[in-house]
Structure formats: structure tokens, C-alpha cells
Amino acid sequence: MMLRGFSIREELLNNLRAAYARMWVRLRGANRDPISLVAEIGLPILTIGAYVVLYRAIGFPSTASSAVIVGGAMVAFWTNVLWNMSSQWFWEREQGNLEMYLVAPVSRMSILLGMALGGGLNTAIRALGIVLLGIFVFQVPFQLRDPLLVGVIFVLTLVALYALGMLFASLFMLYGREAWNTANLLQEPVYFLSGAYFPGFYVPIVPGAIQVAGSLIPMTIGLDAIRRLAIGGGDIASVWLHIVALIACTLILFPIARRALNYMESLGKKEGRLTLRWQ
Amino acid sequence: MAVADFVKSAGESFRVGWKIESNWTDPVLFATYQVIRPLASLLIVSFIVIIGASVGASANSAFYTRYLAWLIVGNAFYAFVLQIMLGMAILVHVDRTRYEVLKNIYISPGTLHPYVIGRGLVSVVNGAVSVILTLLFSVAIFNGLLHMNIPLNLLNVNLLMLIPAVILGIIGLLAIGYMLCAVNIVSNRMEFILGDSVSGTFFLLGGVIFPITSLPSQIQLISNVLPITFFLNAIRESFGITSMVTGDYMSNLTFLALTTLVALALGIGVFRLAEQRAKKLGLFDRKSEY
């Protein structure tokens, strides 16, 4: 919908400004506290460390530990999608910001885009820290032949993952305490279904049904592709299907997120739940 | 404060806490939410062991079934750690910033102590629901569905060994949770970090998914002063799991009692210090949303 009195260019600029502003708040807010930054890099290492020790105790090759470090870094993105995208409208409503977004002359999607860009950048910094710290602490091998391709897969994964985050944000929009509990609920099951802590996911021992369910999460596809390239020393031939799947995920999830957001907003208006706090 | 008043206040706090935690949905969905997270954690580590067994990473199949039994019990009871640490770490923030009632609770005759204990007990009940359902589902999945013959019989649990270990373990964990509340009273930046830090440290060092003997010897020294290590050892022995468990039941229970006592003394001491400091600096009604 185009606002009266604005040209397409002006409207686009307005929305880009809104996205930039929301991204800036996210970047500034998340990086102003060094304790949080250190904790967000250090904490995943505790879990990753436990799995690395388990792999070593069972006698897996060291590449399995490399896989768990990449998985642990990608988990940071999932956590960010859950807590800082999916539940974000809930936090905003609790703090009284949601009504301001709703009366602003911009698309709600631009606010979500800003959140996603800020969250993605923030988490990328932390994920890099996790990988570097993991390599340093656990001394695991990597076989990176094509860093550019890894970068492309990584960006495609994030785009698809944050498109899923936008969809969740829309669906969670009217949640009260359910938002908190549902975000909690979606952590470990997705760690399991994405194979984040497994040495490999698309292997015969993992049941087909679990592989299919896991493939509905973009992180699973991206993670497998990154592992093939960065640990298995693969090339484009081993990940082209992943690239197609990630692009397809984005193309499917983004319009659904937009429709879901419009629907939930209109439902919230009808039921008077958009400004409801302390549910 | 009389004991009866303390118990009454703690009971009221429990009632409020239970409603906040559970009345957002129906009981079946609530129980489902409580079990899915620990069950998924268990499935992650179990699949790692199963993948290990399938590629013949080490040892024989008997080793893996014993390991799975060891893993299931440890992972199921780790739910107490998760629930208590995460629940108590966020408590002060939620009541001070979100509901803005911490100051009212503080100035009420009941004081904060029974309130924190009551709310901690809600986490204990949540943990207990998770533990029971996780154990039942584990046996149903691994023995019933996958026919793995894991040597774990829930009907053969020695309750005389299990109950003291669970009680002591829960007191120890509540005492640590008490410390987390204390830290959050005087800080407004740690609420989302503390619970994960402590539960993550216990996950790595407490012998949850691998025996602590797999850790470097210097790090084992830390494991050996954590109540969780002895808690899980004693629990596993009450389930008849003795392989990969260091020490006998009585020694584990004794060390659990000692470490719990130390945690309790520290918890009460730290909480009192935090309370005094918060009163002095006016921190009970500090808003910290950002």
C-alpha cells in the first residue's frame, strides 16, 4: 500500500531509513555492554566444549569436533532469531514501543528488516568469536578451499533464516507469556532437528523422517553445506542443491511472513490486543 | 519471623509463581512444553552415541547401551539444574522490571526470603515434571520403539537411595539459585547471562553427558567441588548404574551434603549482603529495560 502524498522513491527511502534506524538501535544496544559480548561468545563454548569432550570420549575423529564448533556458531543465529526476532514484538509491546511502530508511516516489514540486519550482524560477530575461540581451545582441523563460496552459502542461510524469523515474529505478535515459553520450546528441538551438534546430518543413521523435518529449517541446509565446504573440503558440486534449497526457502518464507504480519496486525486491532501488556 | 509465617509466605509465593508459570495455557500443553526441551537435549546426545556405535567409533555395543542408560538418567535429572538456574536467575528481573512488584514484596512483612524460596520451588516442580516425563519417554523410545535393550528399569529404582540424593541436590541447587537472585538484585545486566552461565558450566563440568574423568585432570578438580557431580553420581547409583560412576553411593551422598552445606551458607550470606547493598543504594525499584 502506498501512502498518499509520497512517491514510490520517497516511500522506499522512508522504509530504508526505518530499517536502518531499527538496525542501528539493535547494533548499539547489543554492543554497548562488553560483559554481554564476552558472555555471548564464551557461553556457547561451554556447550560446544561438552560435546567436543563427548566426541573425544567416544572416539570420534577430530573432524566431528570441527562440525560441532560450526554447529555451535550457527546455533547462535537460531537463538537470535528466536529471542530477538520471533519474540521481539512481545518485548516491544511490553515496553510500549509497538504502538509507535504501528502509527509510524512505514511498513512493519522494514522494522523487521532492520531487526534482522542488526541481529544478523551482531550474531555474525559473536559466531566468528565462537569459531575462533573454539578452534583455539579445542585445536580442531578445518579444510577451507573456497572461502568465497562458504561466504555465499552463509549469507543465503542467514537470509532464509531471518525470513523464517520474520514469519515467527508475525505469528508471535499477539503472544503474551506464550512468546517466552514458545521461544524456549523451539531451542533444543531445533538443535536436534538441525543436527547442529551432530558430526553430520544427512547420513544413513539419522532416520529419514528426522532429515525431512530438519530440512524445513533453513539452518539445517546451510549448516550441512558449510560443513561440507569447510570441513569436508567440498566444492560447488557438493552444495549446489543446498543453494537452490536456500533460495527457495527465502522466496517462500518472505511473502508468507508479509501476509502473516498483515493478518496478525489486523486480528490484533479487531481484538484490541496490540497494546495489551502483562499477559 | 516465625517458622509458620515463613512457610505461609513461601506457600503463597509458590502459588503465585505456579500461576505465572503455568496458567498461560492448559495443563496438557504445559506438560508438553516441559518435556520437549529436555527430551530433545537427550535425543541430541543419544543420537551422538548411536552414531558413534554405528560407525564403531570405539568399544562394543554393550558399552553403548550402558552408556545410554548412564546418559538418560544424568540428562533427565539435569532438568532440575536447568529449571532452577534459569528460573531463579530471571526472577528478580521479571519482578522488578516487568511486573514492578519487587519493592512491594520487599516492604511486605513476608520479606524476600520466603518469596524467593517459594518461587524456587515452582522451578523444582517444573523440573520434577520434566524429569519424570523424560525418563518415561526415554524408556518408551529407546527400549519400546527402537528395541535397544538399554539396561534401565524404572521400576527397580532404589527410592531409599534416590530420595535423599534428590532432596540434598535440590537444596544445593536452590542455594545456588539464591546466589543468582542476589547477584541480580545488585546488578541489572546479568539476568540473561547468569542462568545460562551456571547451567552451562554444570553441563560441561558436572558429568552430565560424559564422565568427569574425560576432562583434563586440572579441570576435574573443579568438577569435584560442584554439588551437581555428586548429585548425578548418587542418582545414577540409585538407578543401579554403577559403571562410569566414581565413588560409592555413601561417599557421593556425603560429598553432596557437604557441598550443599557450603552452597547454602554462601547463598544466604551473599543474599544478605546483596539485600543490604540494594537497600543502601535504592536498587529495589530500579528499572532496567533497554
Image (spheres, rainbow, N blue to C red):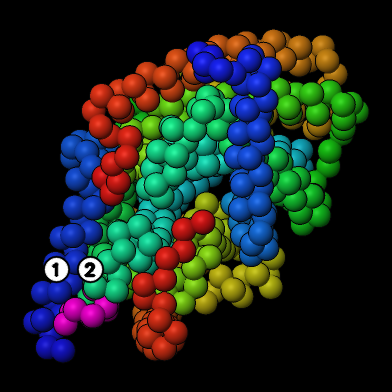
Secondary structure of the residue carrying tag 2 is: helix
Percent of width and height locating residue A245? 65, 12
Which image quadrant: the N terminus of chain B? bottom left
For label 2, the residue is B118
**Residue A277 visible in the current orientation:** yes
The lab-note entry on whether marks 1 and 2 share a chain reads yes
Give the class, few, some or many, for how many residues have Cα within 10 Å of label 1's Cα (few <14, many ≥20). Answer: some
For label 1, the residue is B11
Q: Are marks 1 and 2 in contact (CB under 8 Å)?
A: yes
Give the class, few, some or many, for how many residues have Cα within 10 Å of label 2's Cα (few <14, many ≥20). Answer: many
Residue type at numbered disc 2: Gly
Label 2: chain letter: B
Residue type at numbered disc 1: Gly
Q: Report how far apart the C-alphas of labels 1 and 2 lie in the structure.
A: 6 Å
Label 1: chain letter: B
Write the residue at 48% across / 24% down: A167
Write the residue at 60% across / 11% down: A251
Q: Quadrant of residue A143?
A: top right
Q: Nearer the viewer, residue B44 or A123?
A: A123
Residue A260 lies in the magenta-colored region:
no
Q: Farthest residue toward the front? A: A5
Write the residue at 28% across / 34% down: A273
Percent of width and height locating residue B231? 40, 67
Total numbered labels: 2
Whether B286 is drawn above or below A125: the answer is below
Asked whether, in this view, residue A234 is left or right of residue B207, the answer is right
Residue bounds of the magenta highlight: B105-113
Percent of width and height locating residue B85? 41, 62
Q: Earlier in the sequence, mark 1 or mark 2?
A: 1
Q: Quadrant of residue B240?
A: bottom left
Write the residue at 22% across / 38% down: B25
